[in-house]
Image: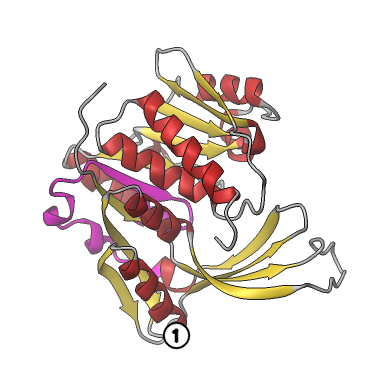
Amino acid sequence: MKSTRKAKVVVVGSLHYDIMVDAPDRPKKGETVTGYSWHPKFGGKGGNQAVAAAMADADVSMVGAVGDDDFGRFLLTKLQAANVDVSRVERRPGVGSGMSVAIADSSGDYGAVIVSGANLLVKTEAVEEQVLWSRAGALVLQNEMAEEINIAAARAARKASVQVCLNAAPYRHLPEALSQSVDLLIVNAIEAEQLGGLEVNDLNSARAAAEKLALHYPAVVVTAGGDGVAGCENGKQPIVLEALPVKLISTHGAGDVFVGTLVSAIASGQGFEASLRIANEAAAAHVSTPAN
């Protein structure tokens, strides 16, 4: 087993003030559903992944933006409470912080609408300072940020010999300027199908999708929800892990916990398969824990 070290992870990503609604079902078009309750929650893929990486014992630096409003102050407080460095989170006056409304149904599944707000106003200068990349082992990106920021961050990370990990969610076309810099691609079943053209509906198809995408990326992870996860490094045999048997409470944020934990483990020197197992366990604990 490789020796591990304290990892430094840089997360360039979104911050959202989430309004969580518990309801018997999600409304269809034109339908009104009476919910049970609602509560605010820290969110945004970038923010969730930063906190997850910090909880997995990484030193985490967050690059992002919030508005000069109550939502923004809430988000910064939560990051600081998780020991995430927020010195590169911009505070933008006159602009609303990112937010979302998520409806969780009685099965534990959910749907959400996001409003990006300040997240789309991060400046490229924020990722170009060499000191940001000092001691860093990995960069985490997602598709909730402006494309030019992801490209600038990936280029800066590669220049500093830092691994680039892209959680390509939500799906959008990946320009060559970004895809050619990616060392680890992480996608769910829907995103894998959109990027690789293979339908993913179980672990076998997740394995096939990971294998196909790994022809174009050094390493790929395809999460298949309650079935499990498949990973493949270019030129190697795929790794398939079944989901751990737990009582499902809510899937909200599980993918972000998986990503943050996975990248933290990889950056600390854990091998690919060991990192997948650690992340799989963290996601299982998350979906089976109340009030995430």
Give the image location of residue 84, x and y in percent.
Answer: 29, 62
Q: Residue at x 42, y 78 (%)?
A: 74
Q: Residue at x 45, y 19 (%)?
A: 215
Q: Is residue 146 visible?
A: no
Within 10 Å of disc 1 (Cα), the crowding (few <14, some 14-19, many 20+) is: few
Decide which of 179, 65 is in the foreground and name it: 65
Which portion, as a residue range, is magenta?
A: 121-150
Decide which of 201, 78 is in the foreground and name it: 78
At label 1, which amino acid type do we have? Asp
Residue 145 in the magenta stretch? The answer is: yes
Give the image location of residue 88, x and y in percent.
Answer: 25, 67
Residue 289 in the magenta stretch? The answer is: no
Is 252 above or below relative to 74? above
Q: Residue at x 22, y 63 (%)?
A: 125
Q: Secondary structure at mark 1?
A: helix
Is 4 above or below relative to 67? above
Q: Which residue is mark 1?
A: 70
Counting every numbered tag in the picture gives 1
Is 118 above or below relative to 44? below
Give the image location of residue 134, x and y in percent.
Answer: 13, 49
Left or right of 219 in this view: 44: right
Give the image location of residue 30, x and y in percent.
Answer: 87, 69
Task: Give residue 40's quadrant in the image.
Answer: bottom right
Q: Residue at x 19, y 46 (%)?
A: 136
